[in-house]
Image: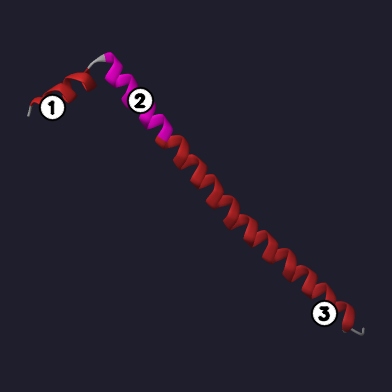
Amino acid sequence: MFYQDALLEYLSSPEGINKIIVGIIIVAAINAIFITYSVRNTYGAAKKEKDRLIRQQEKINKLSPKKE
């Protein structure tokens, strides 16, 4: 019980509050990095797939042009 009281007292002090705030900022920064990585991979893969399909359609059109 003594350690819990000491810990709560330390976290209530200005030094403890500063450490809590720094911890929250670090966790938020890491979270933002993971979100950015995930979004880039998702949209990057979709863009590559779209480009691949466009090139594939161009090859098909080149091999069998429509006669008008």
Determine the residue positioned at 73% across, 70% down: 53
Q: Which residue is mark 3?
A: 60
Calculate the distance from the C-alpha at mark 3 to the C-alpha at mark 1: 73 Å
Calculate the distance from the C-alpha at mark 2 to the C-alpha at mark 3: 58 Å
Q: Which residue is mark 2?
A: 21
Determine the residue positioned at 37% across, 31% down: 24
**Which quadrant of the structure image shows residue 61?**
bottom right
Q: Which residue is mark 1?
A: 3
The answer to which of marks 2 and 3 sits earlier in the sequence is: 2
The answer to which of marks 2 and 1 sits earlier in the sequence is: 1
Q: Disc 3, disc 1: CB below 8 Å?
A: no
Q: How many numbered tags mark residues here?
A: 3
Q: Is residue 4 visible?
A: yes
Q: Specify start and end residues of the magenta stretch as a single range.
A: 14-26
Q: Disc 2, disc 3: CB below 8 Å?
A: no
Q: Amino acid at mark 3?
A: Ile
Determine the residue positioned at 74% across, 68% down: 52
Q: Amino acid at mark 2?
A: Ile
Q: Is residue 19 magenta?
A: yes
Q: Indicate whether 5 appears above or below 28.
A: above
Calculate the distance from the C-alpha at mark 2 to the C-alpha at mark 1: 22 Å
